[in-house]
Structure formats: structure tokens, C-alpha cells
Image (cartoon, grey):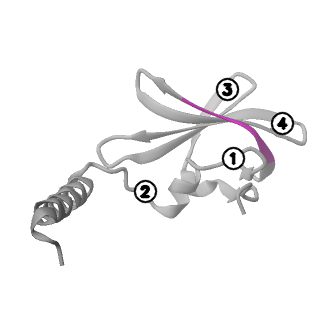
Amino acid sequence: MCKPKLESGCWRLAADVWHLVRRWWASDRIRLSPDEGRLLRLEPGSILVIEGRPVEVLERRAGEAAAGPYVEYRCRGSGVQGRLRVAPLGPDHCLRADWLEAGHSHGLPPVAIEVYMAPSRFV
């Protein structure tokens, strides 16, 4: 139980925590399926299977274009080098994935990309 002098401090702390929880709950968070969310959390060393070809993620880079934020992965496989660019689109934040290879780009549905995450460095 709070002592009289500390009582206002206890109530203030409780009110601050309540305010923080309400702000978090009401904020506009990006909501994605686990399959789509994995494409935003890839690390170097992860393996992707794109159009039946396995590639390794070499580098991860986040950026912002006129269309909005994106994450781009530089990838390399047997006889293939390319970049996978992943970006949320529209008000429902669906993901768009584009495979860029040899100067050509084409869209892929995120569920068509198999993901094998790299082992975590913090285990």
C-alpha cells in the first residue's frame, strides 16, 4: 500500500502505464500474416527459393522510395544473382515482392517465396 506522500506517485505511475497501453492499442500497426512478415525479417545467410531456384541472402538494405518504404535483399545462387525488393502496399499493408535480375523485374506473390531463416546470432 502506498504511503500518503507516495500515494500520488503510485497513482501517477498507474495513470502513465494506462496511457501508454491505450496509445499502443490505438496506434496504426502494420498487420501481416506470418508468411509475409518473414520476408521483412530476413538476415544475411537466409536461404530463399524463388521460382524453384535456391538463393542465399547476402545483404539486407532498408530504404524509402517515392512509393514508400521497402526492404531490399541482395541474393546469389548457382548461376543467378538478383535482388528481392519487398514493400507494404495500400491501407491494408499487403506486401509486394519484386525479383530483379539481369535488368528485368517481375512481381511475385509473397507466398510463392520459400524462406529458410538464417540461424539467429543471439541464441
Of marks 2 and 4, the one in the foreground: 2
Q: In the displayed structure, would residue 57 be above or below residue 123?
A: above
**Picture residue at 69% right of the left edge, 33% below the top:** 83
Gap in Å between the C-alphas at discs 4 and 1? 19 Å
Residue 43's disc number: 1
CB under 8 Å between discs 2 and 1: no
Can you identify the residue that label 3 sits on? 104
Which is nearer the N-term, disc 2 or disc 3? 2
The x, y position of residue 45, in whole percent, is: 78, 48
Q: Is residue 59 left or right of residue 3?
A: right
The x, y position of residue 78, in whole percent, is: 90, 42
Range drawn in magenta: 55-62
Q: Is residue 88 left or right of residue 57?
A: left
Which is nearer the N-term, disc 3 or disc 4? 4
Q: Residues within 10 Å of mark 2 (few under 14, many from 20)?
A: some
Q: Is residue 13 left or right of residue 40?
A: left
- Quadrant containing the C terminus is bottom right
Query: In terms of secondary structure, what is the magenta stretch mainly?
Result: strand
Residue 32's disc number: 2
The amino acid marked with disc number 2 is Leu
Can you identify the residue that label 4 sits on? 80
Which is nearer the N-term, disc 2 or disc 4? 2
**Picture residue at 41% right of the left edge, 29% below the top:** 68
Gap in Å between the C-alphas at discs 3 and 4? 13 Å
Q: Residues within 10 Å of mark 3 (few under 14, many from 20)?
A: few
Q: Quadrant of residue 119?
A: bottom right
Of marks 2 and 3, the one in the foreground: 2
Which is nearer the N-term, disc 2 or disc 1? 2
The stretch drawn in magenta includes residue 94: no
Given residues 120 and 38, the one toward you in this image is 120
